[in-house]
Structure formats: structure tokens, C-alpha cells
Image (cartoon, grey):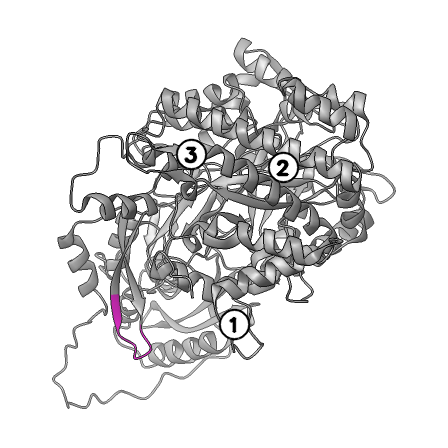
Amino acid sequence: MTAFAAPIAEQIWDMKYRFKHSDGTPIDLTVEDTWRRIARALASVEKDPDKWEAEFYGALSDFKFLPAGRITAGAGTERSVTLFNCFVMGTIPDSMGGIFDMLKEAALTMQQGGGIGYDFSTIRPKGADVKGVAADASGPLSFMDVWDSMCRTIMSAGSRRGAMMATMRCDHPDVLDFISAKQDAARLRMFNLSVLVTDPFMEAVKTDGPWDLVFDGKVYHTIQARELWNRIMRATYDYAEPGVIFIDRINQMNNLNYAETIAATNPCGEQPLPPYGACLLGSINLARLVTDPFEDAAALDEAALEDLVATAVRMMDNTVDASRFPLEAQADEAAKKRRIGLGVTGLADALLMVGLRYGSEEAARQTEDWLHAIARAAYRASAHLAAEKGAFPLFDADKYLASESLAHMDDEVRGLIRQNGIRNALLTSIAPTGTISLYAGNVSSGIEPVFAYSYTRKVLQKDGSRTEETVADYAVNLFREKFGDKDLPDYFVNAQTLSPLEHVRMQAAAQKWVDSSISKTINCPEDISFEDFKDVYMAAWDQGCKGCTTYRPNDVTGSVLSLTDEKDSAQAEKIDVVNVEDPTPHGDVVYMTEPLDRPHELEGQTYKLKWPDSEHAIYITINDIVVGGHRRPFEVFINSKNMEHFAWTVALTRMISAVFRRGGDVSFVVEEMKAVFDPRGGAWMQGKYIPSILAAIGGVIERHMISIGFIEGEGMGLKSDPQADLAQARGKACTSCGSYEMRMIEGCMTCANCGYSKCG
């Protein structure tokens, strides 16, 4: 069996990509079996499948070419899953029936494992007239809530929860509500949000001109463009959303601008797609193609790169024919255009191996050269495929070659395309590769910098104990193999030490030779000023990027993974239980009075509690009784539509009510509940860290007690919650494994411990 570069790589393979029976018995006994399964499946559509199976296996071996997770997990399994990662759904009609038809299509697509994008700009704004029913429209955000609820109920193939992108034009009347929608910590958690920014809007921002918010020809409001831009920037600065998509640039640079109009992207933004557009993904592992790493002669093997790209293009083109599609419209769209998204991973590691500092001008030039070589090889390979198998059905040589993105391709490639046509309308994309990068030995992800050169990972053993293992970056491991404990050179930089504008420089360099788009996160320091933050987005616009996504750690979104010293780690490891002092001696029996009688009628209040990432609210009713002229809590009722909460809410209702009815000082109930923390992590609510949903309920009861005068003010509770300290220092806990190893990578929170990603 091939030796995995790190234990985490084998664990990721076993958990996410290894083909198994329904009872968990492995079918893929080794990773070579996985490669063979994929190669055989994708070669099955060839006239000479044995020849191409061998070629495809060679490309997959040693993790040189990494098909995206859908392909790696699904190809050759005969399971009813799609091998395509990215979908943009059909245009949403501005009618109730049409909207819910679109909702059904979205559910079917997500059920098969596809991430989806939608443009909600086509729905009339809130308050607009609804003809024929004498009512006002509820607006696009109300329907986004419906989509969000649908997404929560659907688990994608391989236990991967679906992800969605929602876009809205910068001139839609509801754009201000769209910008602020996710500032409610419980709303639209299944969506990434991006504003579609037009060229005229950016010009108006620069000149501080007026900007009309319009729908169906009617101007609803006029606002200063710069004010709207500042609202977008402020929301992103404080909440990390929405992102910005330069939609006119995307359409102008689209190879197919003569045949389609784009208004949305897939969830992570690397695939701008037309209605029912679909795209599959795969990445060339640049870290495996560097010869003589860290030596004076270190270089990328460009001959090997060209051969590998050609094989990868053929594999991905075959995937179009081998894949299932959730909807016939998606299959038709894919067949007409045969879009593929070939990208890279391990770029930062490859730069380190040839002695270049990520973010420097030299590294940007090298990145541009490597991406140029990939694009040229991909277009050549696709033109040769067209000679063999035919061009994509909507190919028109004059219109295709007139597109802006083809204008800077060299004459040889343009000549091949004119002579043969081209098999795939678009070929290149930089996708998120967080999980497949771990699977390939923890190479750097996509075109991102190395996040951390090493970190400690806790692994749960079968006997319940935990062991620690060090997970090191692929390039660092190679350096250590060559030079032992020698200090890393100065050009070893990571995401935390780079300036935001260095991130932009690298994204812009890669974008010149990527015909689709790029999923990348521009990490910003927490203390960056608002004006400097805005400059990042303007630099992305000025340098030719198609969009921009940033991440700035803050109290609302949490921080990314940070490295702690040994002392901090030891302290964190000790924190495993919460001890609450028992004021009574052990063994003593405390006799309680008889419970108070319940009157026929009681006065009370009902409170609504929205816990972040929970689909349904929890409703807490507290009824009071008057004893000696003073109100005191008598009973509690806790209800939720979420049936997962049913048993414990009933138990909590009965237990708290029983305590309250015994009389006396029952304020201790609040303190006990506030002392409960969830090992998976709590949540930020109204600027305050709450360690668990039980603590949140305790806080509601406490506020009620204060309001009726039962207690004078907020009690102590557990003010030094260990999970709050960890959350401040290390970010949010992973919802899959509970570890504090979440990182913002390519626009998605991704767990370095188990590979879980919100975006699938």
C-alpha cells in the first residue's frame, strides 16, 4: 500500500473517499484501489478503455492529479450521486408557483451532493404590489429563509451537508437588507452571500455619484453609491459577509458571452455559471512536480506538467459523460458546453520549494507563469480532443475566439482552436481544496499561502483515550527530511504574516490565466483599520480580480486557528470538566418542603430564544405566583419545533418546575444552568459568549427573575468559561469533530482535524 505522507491523510481517505459497503466494510482496501476505481470509471467511455485506464491511473498515482471530492468518492461506485461539484440553478420566476418549483429543484440537486448558487435579484422587493391578491410582496429575503430551512434538512452524499450561494444585484431595492441579513446570528446559516457589483456602480463609487435602486423599471430609492459601498464594506468588516462579485467583468471575460449571461456563482465563488450551469473540478498538485526542492536547481517540471494537464483534461471531459445529474436541464447544459474547472493545489508549497516568498512580486510572476503554462496546455489538449471527439455543441469559432479571455492566448493555440474547435468551452478554475489537500499529505490549499507550518492534532482512540500527533505542512516535511532541525529560511511565510495586499497580488496574478474564477480568502488582521480594509477591495477591483472575499477575526465571526505555546496547550488540555461546589456535606440528606399548590390562573411571559445554527427557535414560558405580596417563578415550559430537542426540553421543563414549586431561593438554578458548557463550543449572542444552549436558557430565566424583582441583578454564573477562553484564542469548534481547528480557507470554514468543510 502507498505510504501516506501523514496519518491525517490516511484518515481523511478512510473517512471521506474510501469506497465501503453500507455496513462500513471496505471495498477499497488500499488507496491504489481508489485510484484504480476512479481510473476505470472515467476510462469506461473511451474506445480503448484499457489504455486510458492505465494513463489515468498514472496521473492519479502519487497524488499528482486530484479530482475533486465528488469524483474521488463517487466515481465507479454506481451510487446515485453527481460527480459535479458546482451548480447554479435556474432563474427564479417572480411568482409564487415558480419560486417553489425552484425550491424543489434545489432540494433534488442538494440531495445528490451538489452545492448550488442562486440569484435572488429576480424576485420583487419587499412592499411591492402583488397583482390580483391585493397584497404586498414579502421580498426575496423571506424566500431565502425558506431555502435556508430546506438546506438544513438535506444531508448530501457522504454525510456532506449542502452549501448555497445567494447573490443580489447592487441595484436591487432590497440590497441593504440583503447586506445585513446575516448579522442575525441565527439567520441564513446555510448561505454564503455575495453582492453582484457592476462596472457603473464602481465608477459611481469612485466619483461619489448617486445610485438608483430599481426593479422592473421602477426606481424605489436613490442612494449615494459610496454610501452603499461603505455599507457593504462595514458589514464585511464586522461580519465577514457579504462577498463582492464583479459581475460585469465576469460576463465580459466569459468565453461564452455570446451564448449565456451569468448572474450567480457556486457556493465558494470559483465557478460563475449560467442558469442550470454545472461544473466539475480537479486540481494539479504543483507540490509533486518540483524537482530538486530547496536546491539551487529547484524548478517545476514543465514537461511533466504539460503531460499531466493533458491527461487531466481528458479525465474531466470523460466525467461529463460518466456523471449523473439531478436535473435534465443540468445534464443538457453540461452536454452543450462541456465546462470543466481544472485548477491547482500546493502552489504555496511549490513556491517555497523553489525559494520564493509567497506574496512577493517574484512569487506573483512565477505564479502567473505557471498558471499560463497550465492554461496553454489545457486549451491545447481540449483542441486536440475536439479533433478526436468533436467540439462542444455551441462552439462558434469567430464568436469564441473574439472573447476577451482568448485575446491573449498565443497564435498556435488560437490556430488549433480555429482548425479543430475546442472540446470544453471553459477549462480552468481555482477551487477550494482543503480536504483533498489534507488527503494529498497536507499540501497548501489551492493558491492559498500555508496556514500553519505545523500544529498538534488530538486523535480519539478506540479505548476512549486521546493521543497527539503533529501535522506538518508538506513542504516543511520535505525541508526537515533534507536539512534536519535547521531553521526555516526567511521566505517561509504563512497566512498570518502576509499583508492583505500581498494576498490580492497573488489572486490577481493567478486570475490572468483562469477563465472562470478563483476561490480565495484574503486574511486581514483584526486591527486593520476600516479605510485600509476598504482599500483591499478596491485593489482587487483595480488589479483585475473577478471577486473578493476577506476574513477578519472578530468577536462576531470568531477567530481563525491560532497557534498556542506549550503552556497554553497544557492548560487547555486540563480543562475537561466543570466542578460546581456543593455546599452540603457528602452523605447529608436535604429534606424539602411540600410543593406549592398551583392556582388555576397564573401570569407569565413567553420568550423566544434563537440559538445560532439551530433551525427552529426555542420558546420559554415562565409563569409566576405571588407569595407574601412578592412575585416568584413557579413553573417553566420549554418548547421547540425541533424534535431533536424534545426529550431534553421536556425533562428540563419538569425538573425546573419541580424545583420552583418547592419555594425558597431558587436562583441557584440559573447559576447551575449558566455553568454548563458544550464541549463542541458555544456561540456569540449579542456580543457576548454563551457557552451552551442550556446556558442561554439559564440567561433567559435569569432576566425574567430580574424583571419581576425576584433577584436584584445578574448573578455570577460561570464567568471564566474555559470554552470561551478557547473560542477567543482558537476560533469556533468544528461541528463534526468538536476540535478547535477551524480555519477560513477559500471562503469556507474548514477543519484541519477532520477535514469537515461547510462548503462540502
Label at residue 498: none
Alpha carbons under labels 1 and 3: distance apart: 53 Å
Image coords of residue 229 (percent x, y): 52, 23
Q: Residue furthest top?
A: 207
Alpha carbons under labels 3 and 2: distance apart: 38 Å
Q: Which residue is mark 1?
A: 644
Residue at point 68%, 51% (across, down): 319
Eye-nearest disc, 1 or 3: 3
Question: CB of mark 3 within 8 Å of CB of mark 2?
Answer: no
Secondary structure beneath label 2: strand
Q: Is residue 635 above or below residue 415?
A: below
At label 2, the amino acid type is Thr
Instruction: Say which label, 3 or 2, has the lower sequence index.
Output: 2
- Part of the protein shown in magenta: 461-467
Label at residue 167: 2
**For this rendering, which residue is in front, 54 or 192?**
54
Label at residue 300: 3
At label 3, the amino acid type is Leu
At label 1, the amino acid type is Glu
Secondary structure beneath label 1: helix
Image coords of residue 359 (percent x, y): 36, 27
